[in-house]
């Protein structure tokens, strides 16, 4: 005998069990409460003469920090924190952290008022070495690009990090070291098998800067097939790639000395690279070459990048926004979006611009750096 009510061929009791609506009534699904990301904190490390190096961090694993340095409220379109950055002017740093599936953190704010006069030295690496042996460049400032990818220019070298034993690198003959003369040495070497090693040092992820007068005292190697450079890339290369991140070439030249000898200062960004890049050659005075001590400098201000050699009061090139971009289709000035930039020092071997070394090229070839310094504008 059937004791339950039949609905569409199923007993009502069974329907109740199937839908979960029997035995005391149903309830709507519960959405789990969102966890709020931990708000960023700002840590500081003393630089020089009142400047500080600022680091941002959150205790939420995997979170992304967006920040601003102009006092505006950060948003998803604001720069992503990638590396410690120098603060040498009166600014307010605001930041928040975000993580997928979680609630964004609160915005934190910290004002810096160092009140540093123009022309003040605020950061430097003097490459001091008081020992009797060659030393590693400061690992809290300098890292390395490594390998033999050609780096977009069909270069021929393997770049080696400090103490690398990955062939063809040789830790007993490092490609970058601070010598007992308290100078940085970057060595391009020819290997027994006919290949080349060198070093490409960078401050990416460790130290960055925005604005100021940046200079380095450098002795440049001049040989066929060599391509030494001192330059910057925007921290946001990790998210927008090159050239949108911006590139500033302070010292760059190729091949053997000529008369007059030269250096090129240039800037690159979206819409102005390669044949449409913005660059100016500086010709050394008669009797001078780049294979001698010269100070190569950049004056970076809002909407302006200038370059000088030896005398900061006499820039030989100035590129400005928007004037320098007139007539360049799709050109976007990348140097004032709030991102800082990291420095690079390297000696490339071969590549699209210089061509390959030849029988006249002397190895090892050496770039020497006495110091790198940053002053306030």
Image (tube, rainbow, N blue to C red):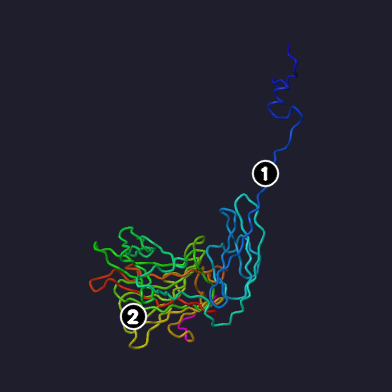
Q: Classify the position of the N terminus by image quarter.
A: top right
Quickly name the residue at label 2. 291
Residue 360 image-quadrant placement = bottom left
The single residue placed furthest to the right in the displayed view is 24
Q: Nearer the viewer, residue 166 or 333?
A: 166
Label 2 to label 1: alpha-carbon separation: 67 Å
Give the magenta part as a residue range.
Answer: 314-322
The single residue placed furthest to the left in the displayed view is 359
Quickly name the residue at label 1. 32
- Mark 2, Cα crowd under 10 Å, few <14 / some 14-19 / many 20+, is some
Q: Is residue 292 above or below residue 84?
A: below
**Which residue does the image show at 53% across and 66% down from the upper left?**
84
Q: Is residue 200 left or right of residue 63?
A: left
Q: Nearer the viewer, residue 208 or 236?
A: 208
Q: Helix, strand or loop at disc 1?
A: loop
- Residue 265: give x, y in percent of width and height: 43, 77
Of callouts 2 and 1, which one flags the residue occurring earlier in the amino acid sequence? 1
Residue 22 image-quadrant placement = top right
**Which residue does the image show at 27% across and 70% down from the upper left?**
357
**Which residue does the image show at 45% across and 86% down from the upper left?**
311
- Residue 147: give x, y in percent of width and height: 36, 60
Q: Classify the position of the C terminus by image quarter.
A: bottom right
- Residue 348: give x, y in percent of width and height: 35, 68
Q: Is residue 295 magenta?
A: no
């Amino acid at each position: 005998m059937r004791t339950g009510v039949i609905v569409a061929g199923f007993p009502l009791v069974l329907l109740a069990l199937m839908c979960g609506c029997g035995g005391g009534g149903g309830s709507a699904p519960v959405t789990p409460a969102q966890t709020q990301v931990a708000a960023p904190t700002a840590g500081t490390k003393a630089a020089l003469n009142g400047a500080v190096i600022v680091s941002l961090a959150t205790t939420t694993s995997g979170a992304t920090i967006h920040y601003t340095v102009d006092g505006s409220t950060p948003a998803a379109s604001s720069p992503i924190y990638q590396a410690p950055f120098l603060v040498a002017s009166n600014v307010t740093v605001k930041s928040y952290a975000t993580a997928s599936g979680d609630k964004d953190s609160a915005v934190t704010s910290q004002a810096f008022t160092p009140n540093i006069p123009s022309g003040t030295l605020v950061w430097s690496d003097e490459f001091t070495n008081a020992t009797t042996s060659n030393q590693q460049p400061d690992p809290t400032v300098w890292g390395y690009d490594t390998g033999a990818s050609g780096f977009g220019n069909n270069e021929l070298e393997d770049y080696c990090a400090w103490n690398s034993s990955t062939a063809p690198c040789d830790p007993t003959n490092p490609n970058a070291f601070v010598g007992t003369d308290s100078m940085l040495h970057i060595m391009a070497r020819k290997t027994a098998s006919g290949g080349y090693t060198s070093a490409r040092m960078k401050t990416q992820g460790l130290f960055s800067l925005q604005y100021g007068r940046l200079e380095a005292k450098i002795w440049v190697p001049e040989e066929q097939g060599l391509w030494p450079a001192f330059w910057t890339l925007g921290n946001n290369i990790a998210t927008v790639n090159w050239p949108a991140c911006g590139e500033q070439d302070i010292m760059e030249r190729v091949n053997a000395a000529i008369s007059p000898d030269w250096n090129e200062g240039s800037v690159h960004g979206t819409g102005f690279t390669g044949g449409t890049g913005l660059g100016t050659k500086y010709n050394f005075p008669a009797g001078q070459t780049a294979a001698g001590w010269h100070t190569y400098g950049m004056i970076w201000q809002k909407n302006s990048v200038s370059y000088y050699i030896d005398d900061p009061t006499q820039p030989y090139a100035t590129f400005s926004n928007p004037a320098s971009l007139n007539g360049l289709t799709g050109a976007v000035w990348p140097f004032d979006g709030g991102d800082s930039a990291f420095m690079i020092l390297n000696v490339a071997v071969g590549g699209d611009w210089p061509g390959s070394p030849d029988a006249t090229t002397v190895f090892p070839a050496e770039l020497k750096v006495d110091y790198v310094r940053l002053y306030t504008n």
